[in-house]
Image (tube, helix red, strand yellow):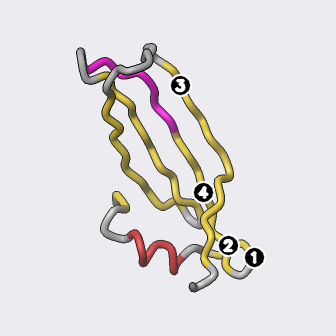
């Protein structure tokens, strides 16, 4: 409704251990704001033994009405989740 669109600018993934079909896993996520960027850090753990299977860093920027902006409106929506 506000015309805010987060867009993925970069993804980095480090695969550590395999997951097989049917295995349960847990994803843990935290995020930080770095200037106009919002960086999401995600770790995926296998439930059976707690092994780290993958770690990812997803960098996003925000657009509003089709133009890159500072992301202040997006930050307001997510402020309770942003690590400081």
- Could you tell me which quadrant the C terminus lies in? bottom left
Q: Residues within 10 Å of mark 3 (few under 14, many from 20)?
A: few
In the rendered structure, which disc, 3 or 2, sits on the residue that comes first in sequence?
3
> In which quadrant is the N terminus drawn?
bottom right
Q: Which residue is mark 1?
A: 67
Q: Which residue is disc 2 drawn over?
A: 63
The single residue placed furthest to the bottom in the displayed view is 2
Q: What secondary structure is marked by label 2?
A: strand
Q: What is the C-alpha distance between the residues marked 3 and 1?
A: 31 Å
Question: Does residue 54 belong to the magenta stretch?
Answer: yes
Residue that appears at 45% across and 26% down: 54
Is 57 on the left-hand or right-hand side of 49?
Answer: right
User: Disc number at residue 16?
Assistant: none
Secondary structure category for the residue under label 4: strand
Report the Cα–Cα distance between label 3 and label 2: 28 Å
Q: From which residue to which does the magenta span run? A: 50-56
Q: Quadrant of residue 76?
A: bottom left
Residue at the spot of label 3: 14
Cβ atoms at labels 4 and 2 below 8 Å apart? no
**Residue 63, percent across and down?**
67, 72
Which residue was labeled with disc 4? 60
Give the Cα separation between the discs numbered 4 and 2.
Answer: 10 Å
The secondary structure that dominates the magenta segment is strand
């Amino acid at each position: 409704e506000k015309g805010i669109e987060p867009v993925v600018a970069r993804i980095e993934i480090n695969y550590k251990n395999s997951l097989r079909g049917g295995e349960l896993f847990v994803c843990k996520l935290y995020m930080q704001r770095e200037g106009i960027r919002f960086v999401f850090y995600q770790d995926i753990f296998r439930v059976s033994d707690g092994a780290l299977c993958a770690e990812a860093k997803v960098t996003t920027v925000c657009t509003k009405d089709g133009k890159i902006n500072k992301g202040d409106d997006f930050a307001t929506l997510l402020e309770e989740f942003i690590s400081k």
